[in-house]
Image (spheres, rainbow, N blue to C red):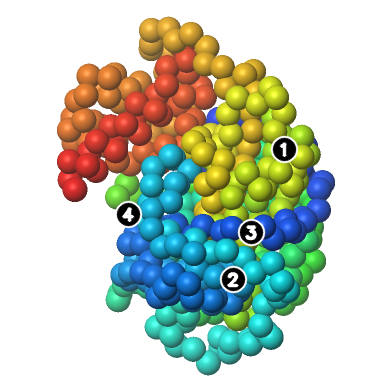
Amino acid sequence: MGLLFSLRRSFAHGVHPEHHKEQTADLPIQRVPFCSRYVMPLGQHIGAPARPVVEVGQRVQRGQLIGEPGAFVSTALHSPVTGTVRDIGPHRYIDGNFRPAIEIEADPYATQQLPRPTPIDWRSLDIEQFIAQVQHAGIVGMGGAAFPSHVKYAIPEGQQIDDLLVNGAECEPYLTNDHRLMMERPEAVIHGTEIVRQKLGAKRATIGVEKNKPESIAALKAQIGERPIEVVALEVKYPQGAEKMLIKAVYGIEVPAGELPRDVGVAVNNVGTIVAIADYFDSGMPLIERIVTVSGPGVAEPANLIVPLGTPIREVLRFCGGLKESTREVIMGGPMMGTPIADLDAPILKGSSGILAFTAKETGRPPEYPCIRCGRCLEACPYFLNPSRLAKLGRARMFEEMKEQFHVMDCVECGACTFACPSNIPIVQLIRTAKDNLRQRKG
């Protein structure tokens, strides 16, 4: 396996959807103009929501703390603009439900410039202080999962991180925000990687990038210098960006079911997260904006944009020329794992990697046929589950059997099974429903 592995950096199973990155891959990152209203949900991440530390009517400055962490698995929240707090209460989320949020009216006369940069000496911090700083900065996984980054750095006693793995795979179709970030700010990627590597005590760091991004690979390699960092070109396959698949592709290590990357001595961060850490320690800027890819057949003018958090999705689309009349659905994230947007007035979140607009051609659901037991879903599943069996049990609402006998909670809902199914069975949707039901029963 040694020679084969060295030649083909990949993992078993998976699928090969069309890339559809040509609309935005060559478009430089732009900044969206500030708008008048911003909504910051308190729960933009996995874990407990933030607690407001501001009041209605209070004036806030851009980058000011407006929400403190609600628990250890939680992060701080900061104002994306200078303005006035207009409301603290329920606001519509991307799924159409109402959730607690802080609404801020931007000051139309403010410059919206950040205060003078105040670098933080990360070298002088011990690991506990470093973790506290990352939590205070509000930094989460920027690839879409939005898991609080500081939690990954809290390594249990007796464990050691040997390798820092930076995820630049960006395997979801259409999305190019990570690609442009690596191309335009490679020095920040390398700098952030070195900060995290040193604080975790890792011997080395590896940045995994799929081969369909040769410009990004070249830009990163040019910035490494003498640092113990390697850039690895990966075979193009979905879901390469999943943590366990990336570890398998880069190191050839299998992370056992039920275990985490740290259990095999690896910490994984998205390139966007790494840059956010570099920016915070270089300038003191917390996570108040992110890069978003706006693309798809239904968008008039696709773009890669720097967007303040809390910006209404409608305003972002307006900047991109609006939606075409043929648009039938808008989703947040990539087409494989993204979430349909129920309300265009919902805000951009910390985990919003993309806004994609699709026409009837892409969203029309073909007729569903009975399972023919072809096994393609088994060949597609990177976690070696039995998606066909899970789908059948899901229809029968046999949720406990799915959990106890067929390990449904190991599914990451990547959608590879649905993509591969010739009978057009909505396998991942049935699995997602089952997992939601099991969580509600547990709660």
Please name whichever residue, 50 or 173, is drawn nearer the observer in this view of the structure: 50
Q: Nearer the viewer, mark 3 or mark 4?
A: 3
Task: Indicate the secondary structure of the residue bearing disc 1.
Answer: loop
Q: Is residue 229 visible?
A: no
- Residue at image location 60% in from the left, 25% down from the top: 328
Q: How far from the left and from the top, in percent, is residue 253?
A: 45, 52
Q: Which residue is mark 3?
A: 36
Amino acid type of the residue tagged 1 in the rendering? Gly
Whichever of labels 1 and 3 marks the residue nearer the N terminus, that label is 3
Q: Residues within 10 Å of mark 2 (few under 14, many from 20)?
A: many
Q: How far from the left and from the top, in percent, is residue 69?
A: 37, 71
**Total tally of numbered discs in the picture:** 4
Q: How far from the left and from the top, in percent, is residue 232?
A: 66, 55
How far apart marks 4 and 2 lie (CA) works out to 44 Å
| Residue 129 vertical placement versus 261 (above, below) | below
- Residue at image location 72% in from the left, 37% down from the top: 322
Q: How far from the left and from the top, in percent, is residue 142?
A: 55, 57
Instruction: Determine whether label 4 and label 2 are within 8 Å by CB.
Output: no
